[in-house]
Amino acid sequence: MIRQHRKLVLYGVTLAAVAGGTWLLERRAAVEAAGPTAPRFEVDPMWPKPLPNHWVVGNIIGLTVDAKDHIWVVHRGASLERMETYAAGNLVGHWGGPGAGYEWPDSNHGITVDHKGNVWIGGNGRGTDPAAKAADARPASGGGYNAGTGYYHDNMILKFTRDGKFLMQIGKAAQSKGSNDVENVKGAAKMFVDAKTNELIVADGYGNKRVIVFDADSGKYKRHWGAYGNKPDDGNLGRYDPAAPAPKQFRSPVHCAELSNDGFIYVCDRPNDRIQVFKQDGTYVKEVFVEKNTLGDGSAWDIAFSKDPQQKFLYLADGANQRVHVLLRDTLEELTTFGDGGRQPGQFYAIHSIATDSKGNIFTTETYRGQRVQRFVYKGLGPVVKKDQGVVWPPVALR
C-alpha cells in the first residue's frame, strides 16, 4: 500500500471593489436564474509529485481520504510488468501483505480509514480452488483456477491500525456460503464505517450480491439486504439488457456503499448501470440509471459526495465511459460530466475510485493499465454551460 500525503499551497487573491458593483450582482443573479449551477473542477497536472526510490504503482483499486486530508490508496503490485520494476529501490515506510494472525487477500480491493483512524481492507481474489487444482484444471482467463465458478478465496475483511498493526478479521478465506451467509463476505468491494453507530457497511460485492453491516468493534453481524431491500438471491440473472425491466436483484459486482451525512446509503449496482438508495436499516428509497445502455463493466463504479454540510452534489465514477458524473443528490438529476478517455492529465483509463477532501477537491484512481491517481481542484460553483465538459484543463495562461 502506498500512502500519499497531500501538500496544499494557498494563494491569496485580493478582490478590489469596482464601479458598477450593483450591475455585476444583477448579472450574476440573472445567470444563476437561467439554469442550474454545479461544482467546477480543474485537473492538477503537477500532482502527485514523483514517488521516491523509483516507486511505481499497479492497478489502484482503493482510495480514501482521512481526517487529516491524507490520501490513502491500495494497489496491486503484482499487476506491474516485469520491466516496470527494474529500477525500483528498496521499499521503506510501508505495510501490508501476509502476516501472523490473519489471511491477506489474494487480490486487494477497497480501503477506508474510519473515524478512529483504523484502516480497513477488502479483497476480491478468487485464488486457487483446491478441488480444481487437484483435478489438474487449467487457469481460465481472468485469473486463478476455476475462475468461472463460484469459488472465492477472499471471503474476509481486515482491520489494522494506521501503522499496520493487525486488529481484527471478519470472515475466513474460502468459507463463503453465498449472499445470505452472515459469517463471511465474498469478494467485498468497498467499506465505510459510520461514526455515529460504529457500524461497518460493506458492498459485498464480487461474489455476493448484497450490502452487509457489521459492528466495527466486535465484527458481529447486524443485517444485510439485496436490491430494493429484498433478500439476496444468487441465481444467474444472465446478461444485462438495458431494454428489459429493471432487475430485482443486484448483479456482481455491487461496487460501493456510501453513507451520506443524513443517513442514506448509496449503492453502486455497477453492471446494472444504476445507483440505489436505502435507509440504514435496508429500506429501499429510490434508484437512478446512469448511462443505461452501458454494457460490459457498467457505469456505476464509485461514489463521493460534495463537502458542503448538506452534501448537495454526488460524484459518480464511471469507469466504462471514462468520466465523472455530477448529480444533484436529493433528486439524482444529472447536471454535467467531465473527463474523457486517454492517458493525459484529466483523462481516464478505467476510473475506479473517487473521494473528496475537506476542501472539496476530487481524487480519482484508475485500474487496469491506468495505474494512477489524479487530483481535480475545486473551483467553486458555476453555471452549467455544457452537459459534457470533456477534459477540465486549467486556463491556457497557467499551462
Image: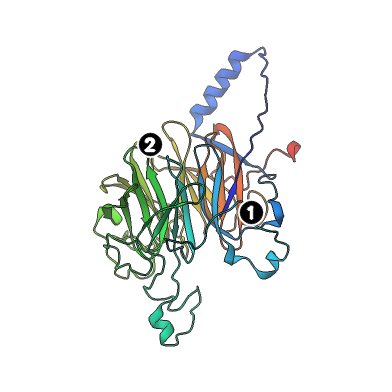
| Residue that mark 2 sits on | 261
Residue under the point 37% across and 53% down = 202
**In the rendering, at what x and y percent does residue 300 appear?**
44, 54
Give the residue type that dot 2 points to.
Asn
**In the rendering, at what x and y percent does residue 88 appear?**
70, 61
Q: Secondary structure at mark 2?
A: loop
**In the rendering, at what x and y percent does residue 298 appear?**
46, 60
Q: Residues within 10 Å of mark 1 (few under 14, many from 20)?
A: few
What is the quadrant of residue 231 in the picture?
Answer: bottom left
Of 237 and 172, which appears nearest the observer? 172
Of 27 and 171, which appears nearest the observer? 171
Mark 2 or mark 1: whose residue is earlier in sequence: 1
Furthest-bottom residue in view? Answer: 136
Furthest-front residue in view? Answer: 100
**In the rendering, at what x and y percent does residue 24 appear?**
60, 19
Disc on res. 92: 1
Residue under the point 61% across and 54% down = 372
Of 185 and 204, which appears nearest the observer? 185
